Amino acid sequence: MKPGARKPLRSREHPRAQPQIAGQPPPHRLNRRDFLRGAAAGMALAFLPPAAAAPAGPVRIETPFHGAIFNPRQGRAVKRGLAIRVSGTAPAAMRVKVNGQTARREGDRFDAEVILRQPVTEIAAVAGASAAGGEDRIRVVWDRHSRPRYHFALDDNIYFLRDIARQRYDSLFDCAYLKLLRNLNLKYGTRFSVNLYFAAEDGFTLAEFPDRYRGQWQDNAHWLKLAFHAYADKPDRPYQNAPAEKLLADYDQVAAQIHRFAGAATFAPPTNLHWSMARPDALRALARRGVRCLSGYFRKDNGGWDINYGLDDRRSEYLSKHDLLMDFETGIIFFRDAIVCNTVTPDQAAQVLAPLAAGPERRDPINLLCHEQYFWPFYPAYQPDYAQRIEAAIRWTTEHGYQPSFFHEGILGSPEA
């Protein structure tokens, strides 16, 4: 049983594992059905040819990782740039140059300094007099204007829209769910990305939602965005093996309805998909639709990586430890969720989040996540302290200097230039 839940969660509720809390026994090992799923340096990055992520010869760049994202605290500030360390291995007898500068050697190790001056920098390590002696190339991203910031995503949303449509409230915020979000925005400035299903299990669809609130949606679009999540809650993992055409058809159907009843200003590209799984062709198609970042949990379970958009083992392992990674083939930044509020009680939120602000590797952008269904008393796993769970995470981020942002803008909410 998850902390704070009244009953064991069924598979439809997708509980996701959380970091172990100090002083508590380790959580039980979750099976694959027990997971809960969980920007670029410009869309032009999506069209850059991918650099090799693995060495072609005896030279190997070990750090940084291909696709690593650097903020100003992860290097040495220099005039109009950031100096970072590059290290790896090469045959001991060979001279190694890194971006044209001779690297220091100690046995089969090499070490050099590279200065990042552009949003994307290619790093080349070449052994011998030319590339014939062996080389390795990677790319990294410089989040030059990075600052502590957070994004709040709400998944699996459909019930609040059904409630408004059927109750015909005078205001959107007569709906208790949206009233909660507005109160948190007024108190903390929090911005919410609300990820929608097209259909509820009882047959209600977005096509039934009236457009009479369109002006109110637009008036609040600076802090409240609507985005695609999936066609419906079932089946589980709807896009894990689905062709791009299926995902795009569902995406376009939801997007069209958001534009109809809430206006273009309220629409945002999604920052995650239902179950955080998709095929490579679908990810490329999403990038063409303007998707710039996607979150997941990137957890290893039952011997394999899951809730990871099907990324290979190396990248999934990196994300499990370093939280952010650029995929140059698509131009999408993948990032790991910091917390899933409906899986921790209010007094546990600080313990889960505290490591993110510790030490020089402080994580600048963090993603807070929760799920709509736990708000509603009719839901089998209703959480009466739902509002307190959300507020506990927001309060911690605010007290530690994190600013609200939308991750679909810039580089995860940070200006690009």
Image (cartoon, rainbow, N blue to C red):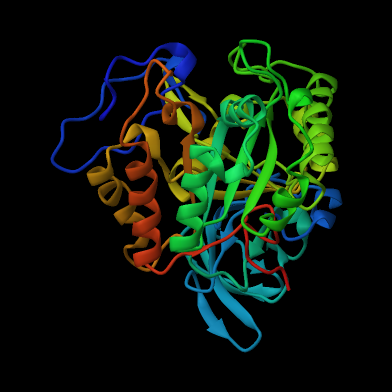
Which image quarter holds the C terminus? bottom right
**Front residue of 316 and 18:** 18
Q: Is residue 349 visible?
A: yes
The answer to whether 362 appears left or right of 182 in the picture is left
The answer to whether 212 appears left or right of 144 in the picture is right
Q: Is residue 169 above or below residue 224?
A: above
Residue 41 placement (x, y as % from top left): 73, 60
The residue at 86%/50% (across/down) is 47
**Front residue of 95 and 72:** 72
**Front residue of 199 and 42:** 199
Q: Which picture quadrant has residue 380?
A: top left
Which image quarter holds the N terminus? top left
Residue 320 placement (x, y as % from top left): 46, 41
Q: Is residue 128 visible?
A: no
Residue 39 placement (x, y as % from top left): 67, 54
Q: Is residue 180 above or below residue 121?
A: above
Residue 19 placement (x, y as % from top left): 32, 38
